[in-house]
Image: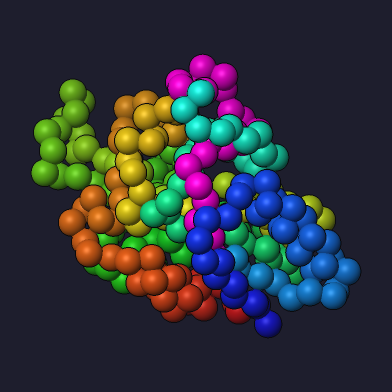
Amino acid sequence: MIEWITSPGLTGFRDAESWMETRVAGILEGSAPECIWLVEHPALYTAGTSAKTQDLIDPDRFDVFATKRGGQYTYHGPGQRVAYVMLDVGARGRDVRRFVQELEAWVIATLDQFNVRGEIRDGRVGVWVERPERPLSASGAVAEDKIAAIGIRLRKWISFHGISINVEPDLSHFGGIVPCGITEHGVTSLVDLGLPVTMDDVDLALRKTFSQIFDA
């Protein structure tokens, strides 16, 4: 059984890390089930294990938290759904690459519930959407924006951290960092795409599509 928890209000980042540590320990001991934890954070930046100092453009804008998840700098804040995924990857095949691909597929399936086509790009972490209404790039490519981020950590094959989907965050808050080290593309959200989607709508979509991707 997988326990789903949705926390109201805003959850502090260090509080979330501490809670995940405790839950992962419980999963390892066999005293707690796997868990999907849905939260929102106050506005903050996190630095993954590959974060580069120069990508923190405005270090005084929000609190910055170093974290042991993979990846570079990312933003969390109100209007963004964070899904922390504490799953036993060891029992699911011990294939980290496949697990990340499943997380990507979960995000894409969730976006599809709102008729949004999310896509993966080689060399660019996260999930992207094309913006054909904007001018083509200098290379003639269609403009693309990032709508979801993915970053995980494993301890004895139990996953920490997870995914974040931009529902209706203040997109200007991403301006204090180079999100995931990528400078040539922008950031978007479901509401920015013109969809009247609420956090509850996204939560329902996440639960509906989870079983389509993972062997729950």
Q: Tell me: 116 left or right of 158.
A: left
**Which residue is pictured at 72% across the width and 66% down the height?**
88
Does the magenta segment cover residue 47? yes
Q: Residue furthest right?
A: 29
Of residues 11 and 55, the one nearer the viewer is 11
From this viewpoint, is residue 41 visible? yes
Of residues 145 and 120, the one nearer the viewer is 145
From this viewpoint, is residue 93 visible? no
Q: Quadrant of residue 79?
A: bottom left
**Which residue is pictured at 74% across the width and 75% down the height?**
33
Q: Residue furthest bottom?
A: 1
| Image height of 43 relative to 98, above or below | above
Residue 122: % across, % down = 43, 40
Q: Which residues are magenta?
A: 38-59
Q: Quadrant of residue 204?
A: bottom left
What is the quadrant of the C terminus in the image? bottom right
